[in-house]
Amino acid sequence: MPKTRFQNIVFTAVMAFVMVYAMICYNIALNIGGMTNQIFIMAFSELKIMWPVAFILELLVVDKLAHFLAMRIVTPGLDKPIFIVLAISSIIVCIMCPCMSLIATVLFKNTAENGLVGVWLQTAVMNFPMAFFWQIFYAGPFVRFIFKAVFERDTQSAAETVNDN
């Protein structure tokens, strides 16, 4: 969807925010044994750390790797665009979930009793289904809708300006 570097940065920032915020809320709910309204406020303390981490990781490493791997599964021009989007989104989750789970484990979990590897693996396994389904069915469509609404207007305005001249 993003056509320029600026659009890619904006898209990545918004997607990282939506994904990270939801995953933090989910993990806090798991830790305290259920969902409460307070969780939405509590999540902001972790968000200020995890959102920039996810943004940088996604922008500098995961995006390129996911596109490379997805293009080994789907072919632009032959496959429907939705399949390309789903392939890229799925691979991004497959890469980001273990990475972000490791970072969250190191920063926010007590690993003294069960060890880093055990706590990290449990965290990643618990996070993966939520991250996958949240991305495919909610966050991805929502962010693409918002992105298209904002940047399609810019694209149309630019095209109208060119046509007017």
Image: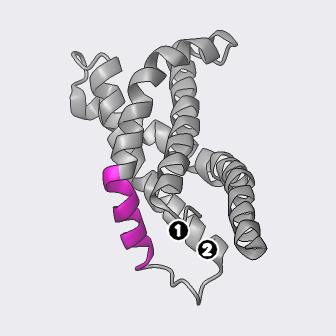
Residue that label 2 marks = 83
Position of 118 with respect to 62 (left or right) is: left
Distance of label 2 from label 1 (alpha carbons)? 6 Å
Position of 110 with respect to 16 (left or right) is: left
Mark 2 residue type: Phe
Q: Secondary structure at mark 2?
A: helix
Q: Residue furthest bottom?
A: 78
Q: Toward the viewer: 122 or 18?
A: 18
Q: Residue furthest front?
A: 165
Q: Residue 73's spot in the image, x, y percent?
A: 46, 79
Report if the CB atoms under discs 2 and 1 are less than 8 Å apart.
yes
Mark 1 neighbour density, 10 Å: few (under 14) some (14–19) many (20 or more): some
Mark 2 neighbour density, 10 Å: few (under 14) some (14–19) many (20 or more): some
Q: How is the image coloured?
A: one colour
State the extent of the magenta-drawn residues as a range: 60-72
Q: Toward the viewer: 143 or 157?
A: 157
Residue drawn at point x = 67 percent, y = 56 percent: 151
Q: Residue 161's spot in the image, x, y percent?
A: 73, 66
Identify the main secondary structure in magenta.
helix
Is residue 66 magenta-colored?
yes
Is residue 123 magenta-colored?
no
Position of the C terminus, as image quadrant, is bottom right
Q: Toward the viewer: 112 or 43?
A: 43
Q: Secondary structure at mark 1?
A: helix
Residue that label 1 marks = 87
- Picture layout, residue 138 above or below residue 40: below
Q: Which mark is residue 76?
A: none
